[in-house]
Image (tube, rainbow, N blue to C red):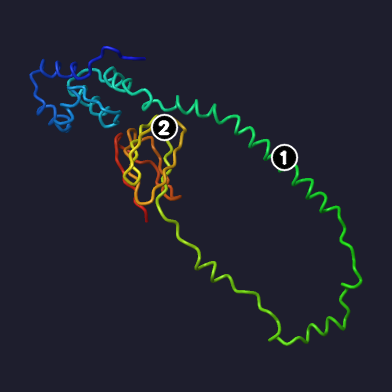
Amino acid sequence: MKHEGVNIGEILKKEREKRGLSLSDIAKETLIREFYLEQIENNEFPRYDGYIAAYIRKYAEALGIDPEPLVSAYKDLFPEEVHPEILNKEETKSKFPFLISVFVVVIILFITAIFAFSHMRNVKPSVNNQNVETPSQSNSSEKTPLSEKKNPPETKNENISSEKKPEGIKVTVTVDSKCWLGVTIDGKYTQLMLYKGQSKTFVGKKYIKILYGNAMHAYVTVNGKDEGVVSKDKRVVEVEYKSP
């Protein structure tokens, strides 16, 4: 639902002035910097930001007005960023024919493997008299000096030395309710929205920093280790994960 005509900054500013409050008073009440309060009142929204959405809500609540229409109006300014699932549906449609082709190829390979295995079981090994080892040949092989026997190459230590410890950082986020994420991976920022039951994995070389817009409903696994819920008592939390 679009909120055309809803002037977020004007509504908040008029209500503040009506109550005889300054931006400094609001900043002390909400713990929001005056810089961001001025941006909101001037409707300076260059891109969608979960922090700004939370600030609008907190600002409205401090003035005693319903924050939902204002927050919804802010989100409606950025429909593609707030509702990326619309784009995901289009991508899924375009990938569907390719997935069918892959599935058919897998089925064909599976059937071929079954026939090949059945054929190998039905073939009986032929006995060649020339290959039957006689007692004399057996005894002669037993008398071969140990120095002439070839020892198998020792590869165990080489394999151990060639193994490398995993590098980088891998973070998987799973949510049980709608949750906005602002993600910075090695200096590159992106943002997305996850919905109930969805998961997303992020991989970085040095660090991954995630701003959770609904931290009490987000669960994290870091490099295969279950870290549990992000926060038990806070909705907006920022966490940085570094490479070991």
Q: Is residue 59 left or right of residue 207?
A: left
- Secondary element type, mark 2: strand
- Secondary element type, mark 1: helix
Q: Is residue 77 left or right of residue 162?
A: left
- Percent position (x, y) of residue 221? 42, 46
Q: Which mark is residue 108?
A: 1
Where residue 108 sits, quadrant-wise, is: top right
Q: Is residue 127 left or right of residue 89?
A: right
User: Please, is residue 61 above or below residue 120 in the view?
Assistant: above
Tell me which label, 1 or 2, sits earlier in the chain: 1
Where residue 76 sits, quadrant-wise, is: top left
What's the residue at 52%, 67% (across, down)?
160
- Percent position (x, y) of residue 218? 39, 37
What's the residue at 18%, 27% (across, down)?
39
- Tell me the amino acid under the disc marked 2: Leu
What's the residue at 38%, 35% (across, down)?
217
Q: Quadrant of the C terminus?
A: bottom left
- The residue indicated by pointer 2 is 194
Q: CA distance from mark 1 to mark 2?
A: 36 Å
